[in-house]
Image: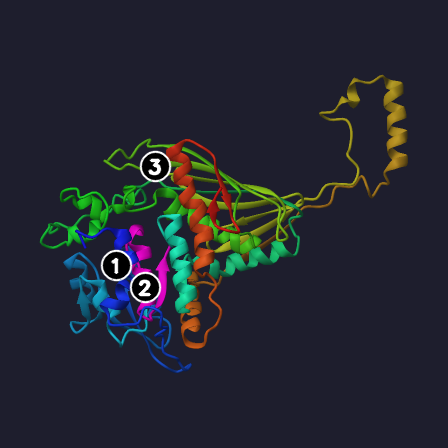
Amino acid sequence: MSSQSRRTFIRQAGGAALLLGVHPFSSLAKPFSTNDKIRIGCIGMGIMGFGDVACALQVPGVELAGVADLYDGRLAHAKELYGPGLFTTRDYRQLLSRKDIDAVIVATPDFWHDTISIAAMEAGKAVYCEKPMVQQIAEGHQVIDTQRRTKAVFQVGSQRVSSLAFAKAQEHFRAGNIGKLNMVEAHMDRHDALGAWQYSIPTDASPSTVDYDTYLKDTAKVGWDPKRFFRWRNYQAYGTGIPGDLFVHLISGLHLITGSKGPSRIFASGSLSYWKDGRDVPDVMTAIFEYPETSQHPQFQLTLRVNFADGGGGGEATRLIGSEGVLELTDRSVRLQKRGLPKAPGYDGWDSFSTYTKAEQEAYVRQYNKTYSAADQQTPAPTSEFYAVPEGYDDRLDHFKNFFAGVRSGQQIVEDASFGLRAAGPAILTNQSYFGRKEIKWDADKMQVI
């Protein structure tokens, strides 16, 4: 692959189809009964790969058939965990060619997502692709087109879309419990090296244990650098930075709650403030998204922030602010706080009322009391309602259950390719705004830059 461009790889795809001896326009997914075993493979056995496999295997009837990774140590560790007989390979295409594999998890660095997802669907596999779905907007449309043509089951792995907490927030929003939504603000701040992507690099990392040339794909052919492989999120060439890793979670959850297809304008600012370790992406970023009024929601503004050098210790919160209340969300809970306004506007206090003559003040009060009843002048008592998910609950497990239900019975997927691009698109454009120092306009219906 090192001599072959990424675009050529995709254009050839019959790509995986021709390679595997498959007609590129056939749907190879076999029908399942509710009792059939589903055998999976995982491509990319990093943090998310091992985590996703462990979670997926908790779903009854799911078995692991093989894994692929470009670092030998991860293949060896997979055998340590799942047995010496586990099929392992550096070449993901060998997994796709196996007839005993029904579905694959794609948990590679971002710049490989589209290529492998497309090849897997062409090969008749169901696909669970980690977020963000793609690294570039055009790639997202290619994934959508492939899914529609092959009719493959395709799920993006942003588990908030399956969360009980976010479903409760959606219920509150649809019931109008916060009044008219006007602003959403969210942050994910961190204060540790691992949270800032300074992942551990194994002592045996070398060109002999890592297929570095294949890893680089169509990016610049730089010399061996273990940081570029094991800390890939730090580089524009391989990842999507803060927006693709973290903003996309917040956007996915928001779109679930509000039914939105996305913003119309995006602007981002930030800096590389603290983690000056060779990375070429910021470690502090704030983005503002303007959401237009639709049939699903009013116009509102979304502000997202991530700070990887938060000396206060970090933390995470999401707030949907309306005219009559606020929804405060975490991964595991949602709190509704309602604080209504009285019908009467009030007077005195920080008001021009005190600047009038005594006679005018008395006249104003008489008129005010005639206009507003005692009930109108009463401020509604604030109320609060709290919901927490059950102890031990795992939204990623629910997300996998939805995916495998789609494989078995055709149940509707909660985060398909179109949903995936509508979440990834604004995240990708956040990077374009930051690096281009400009506002980006986005057509959320067509999923295109204007």
Classify 211 as above or below 125. Answer: above
Residue 210, given in percent of the width and then of the height, sits at 14, 54
**What range of the chain is rendered magenta?**
105-132
Residue under numbered circle 2? 105
Residue 398, disc: none
Residue 217, given in percent of the width and then of the height, sits at 22, 51
Marks 2 and 3 in Cβ contact (< 8 Å): no
Residue under numbered circle 3? 283
Residue under numbered circle 1? 44
Return the disc, 3 or 1, that comes first in the chain's sequence.
1
Of marks 2 and 3, the one in the foreground: 2
In the image, taking residue 357 as reference, residue 386 lies left or right, namely: left
Mark 2, secondary structure of its residue: strand
Mark 3, secondary structure of its residue: loop
Quadrant in the picture for residue 350: top right
Q: Which residue occupies the foreground of this view, 212 or 324?
A: 212
